[in-house]
Image (tube, helix red, strand yellow):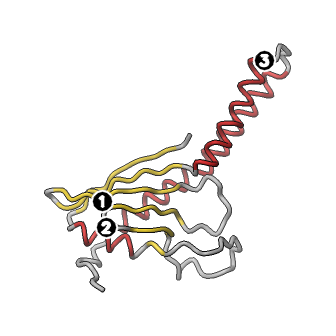
């Protein structure tokens, strides 16, 4: 199943990096609305979820339906030179189970059916499943990585906001 991980080293204290992340993460909506014209993308932060002092669990705030949208988990760790942000992105576990069943059915049919005419159909079935999963996950993972890297390296936020 699709998974992607990376880390970003930042020359800033951990508290500053946490504030930089909080600046780009909004609260998850109570009801998921997938109407493209509902609200402005510029007014909303690019991510929704929760940022804690040492970790975060977020995902991109997408107005389009995408079951393969990466869930982003990360840890914020102090280092001698500043802060390291370790990030792992993966698809939702229920979607992973569905896709495992999809691909498993194709493999099962290929192994149990002696009709050679079904073999190409099963191969196409598997290719379509993998292609749809990759097309939905990897471009969004790339966007999330760029946005997170830009956010934690944001020089305009230099000190934590104390409330």
Task: Give the vertical position of 140 relative to 124 (above or below).
Answer: below
Seen in the image, is 101 located left or right of residue 78? right
User: Within 10 angstroms of label 2, few (less than 14), some, or many (20 or more) residues?
Assistant: few
Query: Image point 27% across, 74% down: which residue?
Result: 155
User: Circle 1 is placed at which residue position?
Assistant: 76
Image disc number at residue 112: 3
Secondary element under disc 3, as helix, strand or loop, is: helix
Q: Nearer the viewer, residue 71 or 40?
A: 71
- Whether residues under marks 3 and 2 lie with C-beta atoms below 8 angstroms apart, the answer is no
| Residue under numbered circle 2 | 53
Residues at marks 1 and 3, CA–CA distance in whole angstroms: 49 Å
Q: Nearer the viewer, mark 3 or mark 2?
A: 2
- Residue 69 horizontal/vertical position (percent): 58, 56
- Give whichever of discs 3 and 2 has the lower sequence position: 2
Q: Report the label total.
A: 3
Tell which of 160 and 137 is nearer to you: 160
Look at the picture and state if 37 lies above or below 123: below
Q: Quadrant of the N terminus?
A: top right
Q: In this rendering, would 131 be left or right of 144?
A: right
Work out how far the residue at label 1 is from the one at label 2, CA to CA, in angstroms.
Answer: 8 Å
Quarter of the rendering occupied by the C terminus: bottom left
């Amino acid at each position: 199943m699709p998974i992607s991980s990376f880390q970003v080293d930042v020359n800033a204290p951990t508290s500053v990096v946490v504030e930089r992340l909080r600046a780009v993460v909004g609260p998850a909506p109570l009801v998921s609305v997938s109407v493209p014209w509902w609200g402005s993308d510029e007014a909303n932060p690019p991510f929704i979820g929760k940022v804690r002092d040492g970790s975060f669990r977020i995902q991109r705030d997408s107005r389009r339906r995408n079951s393969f949208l990466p869930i982003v988990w990360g840890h914020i760790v102090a280092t001698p030179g500043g802060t390291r942000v370790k990030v792992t992105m993966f698809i939702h576990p229920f979607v992973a189970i569905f896709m495992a069943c999809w691909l498993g059915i194709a493999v099962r049919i290929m192994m149990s059916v002696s009709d050679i005419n079904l073999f190409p159909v099963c191969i196409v079935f598997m290719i379509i499943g993998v292609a749809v999963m990759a097309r939905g996950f990897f471009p969004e993972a790339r966007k999330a990585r760029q946005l997170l890297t830009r956010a934690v390296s944001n020089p305009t936020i230099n000190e934590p906001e104390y409330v």
